[in-house]
């Protein structure tokens, strides 16, 4: 074994270093692109008039679809929030997906709902609908009660009943800023022919005060896991998705908050029900459909529409969430493998899919290999500790600088944290996330490969406290 390690060390070290350099070059490039894009976006906002001054005839009506499964702690607040958005023409369709708690009864009680004889066309196959509830006092609200079929099936049920050309998929445990819908619809007004999907930024509501469906106070929670996730979300959205969107290489619009053209989604058969990553799967299939039909398109990310959602606050829930996310990534890339490195699919096949495949999907395996290689080399005393220490220090510093850049981008673009000490409280975690937390997530994502090949389809349980 010792001789084998001595033989492998030079080539393995070089390969890991090259992988690390290419990956972080991408991240730094995305960060630089994001800075330029946010500067351009701020100038644009100064010039553009808001949607509030536009005639109603120019506004695109939106159907908001909110699947709900066992969300009794937050469902009333979330629906109240959706009904209070600043947008002229929209409807809210809540789909109770066979909840076993009081989700439905709390909706019925709070909004005084009655069974309706609403007639609709069943364009997409779904689990049976048991009842539809409405109340004339809330003309925008429709509540569907159906048998459990998981999130994609619930979204398809909402699509069957929806009336408008754009639909917004939101999580029923989330809260939108009052002006989020009018901001996220902007690309559909500027370029209605090409824009097929748009998403805003997801922020964490842990530690925040939400009253009557609106965010009243923002603060940094004490929970260490949540603080790590705040940094992750800022890095993923402001440091990653802004850049990918600029290159028209965005493959995912978050399932917690995304706006889509209904005609394209219906043309590809709605959401695919046998996946645990329905949000990424939908966008990739939309891109494939439009490439094959030779139609130009754009998937946009906007940094100012904000959706607030609760993050897991314990390791079990966090592991369950990230395991499902990675299984969804593997499923989507496996289903779309014919596009990978295929010039027929333009930027999707030559840039977007290769990036997600090489760095997002395979990344945990490379990281695990590096850790195991280091441990074995240490046991057999064939390691250059100076090189290992320098490499680790470089990885920590580069990763921390990217995270710091994302935090500064947030402060520059939104300035949502009212106190300087909130920003300062996050800074140490840019460095600390490289110790234990990052390794735990790598383990969870590697385990996702095992669960994927075992055929696991469960979403896993995530404990949430509600607002």
Image (tube, helix red, strand yellow):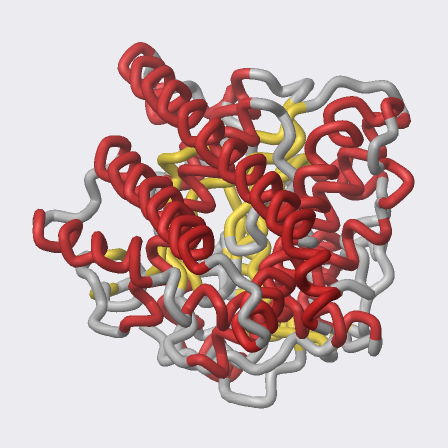
Which residue appears at 45% of the width and 23% of the height?
33
- Residue 91 seen by the camera: yes
Counting from the top left corner in percent of width and height, residue 244 is at 56, 31
Q: Toward the viewer: 42 or 82?
A: 42
Q: Does residue 162 lie above or below 259 as drawn?
A: below
Q: Toward the viewer: 331 or 73?
A: 331
Which residue appears at 71% of the width and 78% of the height?
458
Which residue appears at 52% of the width and 68% of the height?
441
The N terminus - image quarter? bottom right
Q: In which quarter of the image is residue 112?
A: bottom left
The C terminus - image quarter? bottom left
Q: Toward the viewer: 18 or 403?
A: 18
Q: How many labels does the image show?
A: 0
Q: Quadrant of residue 219?
A: bottom left
Q: Does residue 141 lie above or below 238 as drawn?
A: below
Q: Quadrant of residue 227?
A: bottom left
Which residue appears at 56% of the width and 82% of the height?
461
Q: Toward the viewer: 276 or 392?
A: 392
Apparent side of residue 222 relative to residue 226 in the rendered image (left or right): left
Counting from the top left corner in percent of width and height, residue 438 is at 45, 64
Apparent side of residue 67 relative to residue 79 in the rendered image (left or right): right
Counting from the top left corner in percent of width and height, residue 146 is at 71, 75
Apparent side of residue 1 relative to residue 249 in the rendered image (left or right): right
Counting from the top left corner in percent of width and height, residue 386 is at 40, 54
- Residue 163 seen by the camera: no
Residue farthest to the top, as pictured: 47
Apparent side of residue 268 relative to residue 113 in the rendered image (left or right): right
């Amino acid at each position: 074994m010792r001789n084998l390690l001595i033989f492998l060390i030079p080539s393995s070290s070089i390969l890991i270093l090259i992988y690390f350099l290419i990956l972080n070059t991408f991240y730094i490039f995305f960060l630089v692109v994001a800075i330029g894009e946010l500067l351009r976006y701020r100038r644009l906002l100064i010039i553009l008039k808001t949607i509030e001054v536009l005639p109603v005839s120019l506004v695109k009506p939106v159907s908001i679809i909110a699947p709900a499964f066992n969300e009794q702690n937050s469902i009333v607040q979330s629906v109240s929030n959706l009904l209070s958005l600043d947008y002229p023409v929209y409807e809210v369709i809540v789909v109770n997906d066979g909840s076993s708690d009081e989700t439905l009864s709390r909706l019925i009680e709070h909004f005084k709902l009655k069974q309706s004889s609403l007639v609709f066309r069943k364009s997409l196959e779904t689990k049976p609908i048991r009842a539809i509830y409405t109340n004339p006092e809330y003309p925008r609200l429709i509540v569907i009660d159906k048998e459990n079929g998981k999130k994609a099936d619930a979204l398809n049920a909402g699509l069957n009943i929806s009336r408008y050309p754009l639909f917004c998929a939101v999580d029923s445990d989330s809260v939108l800023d009052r002006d989020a819908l009018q901001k996220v619809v902007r690309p559909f007004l500027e370029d209605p022919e090409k824009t097929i999907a748009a998403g805003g930024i997801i922020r964490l509501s842990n530690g925040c005060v939400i009253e009557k469906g609106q965010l009243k106070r923002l603060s940094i929670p004490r929970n260490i896991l949540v603080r790590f996730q705040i940094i992750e979300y800022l890095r993923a959205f402001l440091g990653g998705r802004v850049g990918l969107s600029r290159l028209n290489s965005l493959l995912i619009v978050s399932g917690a908050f995304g706006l889509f053209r209904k005609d394209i989604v219906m043309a590809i058969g709605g959401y695919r029900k046998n996946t645990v990553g329905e949000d990424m799967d939908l966008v990739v299939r939309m891109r494939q459909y439009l490439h094959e039909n030779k139609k130009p398109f754009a998937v946009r990310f906007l940094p100012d529409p904000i959706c607030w959602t609760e993050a897991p606050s314990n390791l079990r829930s966090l592991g369950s969430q990230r395991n499902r996310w990675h299984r969804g990534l593997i499923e989507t890339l496996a289903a779309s493998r014919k596009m990978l490195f295929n010039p027929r699919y333009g930027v999707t096949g030559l840039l977007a899919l290769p990036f997600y495949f090489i760095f997002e999907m395979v990344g945990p395996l490379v990281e695990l290999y590096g850790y195991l290689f280091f441990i074995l080399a240490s046991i057999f005393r064939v390691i250059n500790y100076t090189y290992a220490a320098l490499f680790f220090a470089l990885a920590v510093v580069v990763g921390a600088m990217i995270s710091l850049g994302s935090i500064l981008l947030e402060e520059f673009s939104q300035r949502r944290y009212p106190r300087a000490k909130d920003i300062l409280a996050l800074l140490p975690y840019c460095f600390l996330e490289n110790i234990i937390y990052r390794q735990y997530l790598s383990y969870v994502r590697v385990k996702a490969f095992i669960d994927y090949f075992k055929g696991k389809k469960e979403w896993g349980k995530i404990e949430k406290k509600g607002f």
